Image: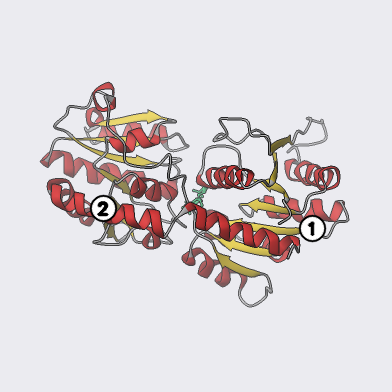
Amino acid sequence: MKKLKIGVICYPSLGGSGVVATELGIMMANRGHELHYITSSTPFRFVDEHPNIHFHEVTIDGYAVFKYPPFDIALANRIAQIIETEHLDLLHVHYAVPHAISAALGKDMADSDIGVITTLHGTDVTILGRDPSLRNTVRYGIRKSTIVTAVSESLKRETMELMETETETEIRTIYNFIDEKMYTPRHPGTLKKDLGIREDEKVLIHISNFRKVKNIPDILKGFQEIVRRIDAKLLLVGEGPEKEKLEAFARQLGIQEHVIFTGKRNDMPQLLAISDMMIHLSEKEAFGLVLLEALACGVPSIATDVGGIPEVVEDGVNGFLVPYGNVEAAVEKGLLLLRDDELRAQFKENGLIVARKKFCSSEIVAQYERLYYEVAGVQ
Ligand code: GMT
């Protein structure tokens, strides 16, 4: 079958959508397709060069007239250039705002009929789609796409509500995936010791971009109760806007010596290898990529039953789900899990099966590949 030339637009910085865009690109490149990333910088997950992957940076010079440099228009301009110079077969856009709009504009600038796939990742619909100052923009980006994919059934439903009855754009669910070779149970090594954690202490882990929507204060409140009853450390992995406030809150709760802010790390599988439990108490979560990473590494989770989380974590099977805002329930389930080695071992086994079957990367990449051929009009 013909190999495709695919333009990819995504956020290059920390975040699940950038991770998915990168991993998908690498797997498509391994299948022989040519990938053209049109972004402000190289996506952070790219470590090695790949002969089938090319980067086209979007730059914009400051100009006195601009109060805000129009990045979205510069992106559209670059997309138009690359459609023409590289003879792209299709565009795959991750995250609706502003990428789907820039793609529609770039396609129009190039006077091209190229197909555009927009993958919705979550807050582009659940937060920005509800914001009156952006709702029409999100709807427009969706309407202008050839096909839209959502990373969970829950996000698909929310998107259909947002669009009401006005769109003919088809919305399909394609789940996220991870690289199973990287995310697999590993030997803990010396990392626990390196982080100053005693061998007999339990380890709870939370990984995120530390935004309000992640509701980390509830994690700290719950951990305060847990650490009163068992010896434990909480790893907070990542960087983000709420970090300073969270450090202050941990001090206010008097648990600062039990909470380790690791900053941004590149050794997630190793961190998961020393963890007994993941904790994720988000207010909204379209999928929860880190929950899948934890399942694949054999770490059960306590998570809120919001958005697409129940499609990843099965309550009482590979983790526990608790209502958003119910810290007591999170503490109760957390203690149950941390105190029962057999239960954790059972959840670990169940989690590995789900991660490898339901979210099997080769199957999900094949779904995207079929979609690419369909949108590119290749039989
Ligand atoms: O909105 C965010 O938190 C950022 C966004 C991203 O770009 O990483 O996360 C969303 O996309 C991820 C990858 O598909 C999902 O795993 C996250 O659940 C989703 N975040 C939210 O819905 C809050």
Name the residue located 78 percent from the left edge and 30 percent from the top edge: 62
Mark 1: secondary structure: loop
Q: Where residue 175 sits in the image (x, y, percent)?
A: 49, 59
In primary-sequence order, the first of circles 1 and 2 is 1
Q: Where residue 240 sits in the image (x, y, percent)?
A: 47, 36
Give the camera-side residue of 51 and 317: 51
Q: Where residue 296 sits in the image (x, y, percent)?
A: 36, 48
Question: Which label was assigned to residue 114?
Answer: 1
* Distance between mark 1 and mark 2 Cα atoms: 44 Å
Mark 2: secondary structure: helix
Name the residue located 79 percent from the left edge and 42 percent from the top edge: 78
Left or right position of 141 against 108 = left
Viewer can see residue 137: no
Name the residue located 59 percent from the left edge and 42 percent from the top edge: 26
The C terminus - image quarter = bottom right
Indicate the amino acid at tag 2. Glu
| Above or below: residue 135 compared with residue 228 | below
Name the residue located 34 percent from the left edge and 41 percent from the top edge: 206
Would you call the spot at circle 1 few (<14 residues within 10 Å), some (14-19), or many (20 or more)?
Answer: some
Q: Which residue is mark 2?
A: 349
| Above or below: residue 250 compared with residue 378 | above
Indicate the amino acid at tag 1. Ile
